[in-house]
Amino acid sequence: NLFRRAQFQLAAHELRQLPADRGAEIAFAGRSNAGKSSALNTLCDQTGLARTSKTPGRTQQLVVFTLDADRRLIDLPGYGYAKVPEALRDHWRKVIDQYLSDRQSLRGVVLIMDSRHPLKDFDRMMLTFCRDIGLPCHVLMTKVDKLSRGEAARTLQQTRKEMGLLCPDATAQLFSSLHKIGVDEARATLAQWLNA
Ligand code: GTP
Ligand code: MG
């Protein structure tokens, strides 16, 4: 399993600190506190790999994890956390936009949404952006352990329907880091992007 081999490489404040732009990488994006770092840990089967927190705004760098010599996962800072100073929010907005537009080795975005609050403005923006630049996007509707089966099925169906209008090629699935739901399904998509 490629993902179990994930190792912390570096945390970058600016794009020029990232490793050389070759090979293949996948970025984890989503609103602050959605569960990005937790999902990354779950997929890699390593609890302490990416730092998680109850307080939003935990990840404040682009954190790079290597899978092997030329494949990587990138944990992006959460978008739109109100208590982060505006100047810092603007900085990250620019850095993330530039990263997503320019990074040649980027194979796809894993968009993490809290399944109780899907398709907020940031998520819509990201899906539209992926459609515009033709970047593959796979949505993990996480924290599904907090929903009943019925609610989960309904919200998945509704989200897929709305996503179809924003980004027809994007895919979505249910996920839980707490209960390890949807892990193999998510790994399969990521492995395909990484050509693994
Ligand atoms: P930032 O780095 O601040 O943007 O947050 P993040 O998106 O990386 O979220 P993180 O993984 O740190 O998780 C935020 C909170 O949600 C933590 O308290 C996690 O324990 C919790 N959480 C994450 N995934 C799940 C899940 O699948 N189920 C439940 N119940 N809680 C979760
Ligand atoms: Mg995080």
Image: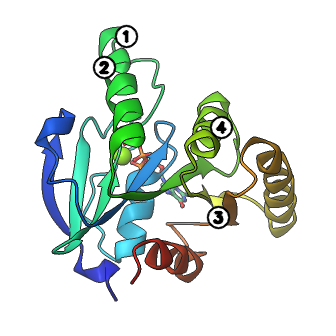
Tag in front: 3 or 2: 2
N-terminal-most mark, 4 or 3 = 4
Task: Report which residue position mark 4 lands on.
Answer: 128
Q: Position of residue 10 (x, y in %)?
A: 12, 52
| In this rendering, position of residue 114 left or right of residue 169 | left
The amino acid type, in three-letter code, at marker 4 is: Thr
- How did the renderer colour the structure? rainbow
Determine the secondary structure under disc 1.
helix
| In this rendering, position of residue 77 left or right of residue 149 | left
N-terminal-most mark, 1 or 4 = 1
Q: Is residue 151 above or below residue 66?
A: above
**Within 10 angstroms of label 4, few (less than 14), some, or many (20 or more) residues?**
some
The residues bearing labels 3 and 2 have C-alpha atoms spaced at a distance of 34 Å
What residue is at 34 percent from the left and 74 percent from the top? 44
The amino acid type, in three-letter code, at marker 2 is: His
Marker count (numbered): 4
Question: For residue 145, which numbered disc appears in the image?
Answer: 3
| In this rendering, position of residue 163 left or right of residue 69 | right
The residues bearing labels 1 and 2 have C-alpha atoms spaced at a distance of 8 Å
Q: Quadrant of residue 154?
A: bottom right
Q: Is residue 142 visible?
A: no
Front residue (pair 49, 135) = 135
For the C terminus, give its image quadrant. bottom left
Q: Position of residue 160 (x, y in %)?
A: 80, 56
Tag in front: 1 or 2: 2
Determine the secondary structure under disc 2.
helix
The residues bearing labels 4 and 2 have C-alpha atoms spaced at a distance of 21 Å
The amino acid type, in three-letter code, at marker 1 is: Glu
Task: Report which residue position mark 2 lands on.
Answer: 91
The residues bearing labels 1 and 4 have C-alpha atoms spaced at a distance of 24 Å
N-terminal-most mark, 3 or 1 = 1
Q: Is mark 3 within 8 Å of ligand 1?
A: yes
